[in-house]
Amino acid sequence: MTYKNLTDLQEGERAKVLSLTNASSIKRRLQDLGLVEGTQVNCIQKSPQGDMVAYGIRGAIIALRAEDAVGVLVAS
């Protein structure tokens, strides 16, 4: 099992959320979007600059900024 940040996922790669290390306000927002321990996340598409990434989370597609996604620890 490989541990990394959500931002390290490549397009088409899947991982499971282990923990969130973001500041409390961002952490709460990410949890409300479905990013909680054990959730499967799919990296769907990265923007050309890499600052926005679309992820598949619980049947929805969510776009996150790299600065918010870097605090999400995942295992692939």
Image (spheres, rainbow, N blue to C red):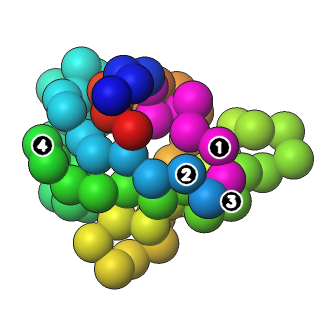
Residue type at mark 3? Answer: Gln
Element class at badge 1: loop
Rendered image: mark on residue 37 = 4
Can you identify the residue that label 2 sits on? 13
The answer to whether residue 37 is above or below residue 41 is above
Q: How crowded is mark 4: few (under 14 residues within 10 Å), some or many (20 or more)?
A: some
Q: Does the magenta stretch include residue 10?
A: yes
Q: Nearer the viewer, mark 1 or mark 3?
A: 1
Residue 27: quadrant of the picture: top left
Q: How far apart are marks 1 and 3 (CA)?
A: 8 Å
Element class at badge 4: loop
Q: Residue at x 70, y 37 (%)?
A: 51
Q: Distance between the residues labelled 2 and 3?
A: 10 Å
State the quadrant of the N terminus: top left
Element class at badge 2: loop
Residues at circles 2 and 3 in contact by the CB criterion of under 8 Å: no
Can you identify the residue that label 3 sits on? 45
Residues at circles 2 and 4 in contact by the CB criterion of under 8 Å: no
Q: Residues within 10 Å of mark 3 (few under 14, many from 20)?
A: some
Q: Quick one: label 4 or label 1, which is nearer the N terminus?
A: 1
Residue type at mark 2? Answer: Glu
Residues at circles 1 and 2 in contact by the CB criterion of under 8 Å: yes
Can you identify the residue that label 1 sits on? 10
State the quadrant of the C terminus: top left
Rendered image: mark on residue 48 = none
Residue ranking furthest to the bottom: 59
Q: Distance between the residues labelled 3 and 4?
A: 22 Å
User: Left or right: where does residue 22 sit relative to residue 36?
Assistant: right
Q: Give the range drawn in magenta.
A: 5-11
User: Left or right: where does residue 4 sit relative to residue 66?
Assistant: left
Residue type at mark 1? Answer: Gln
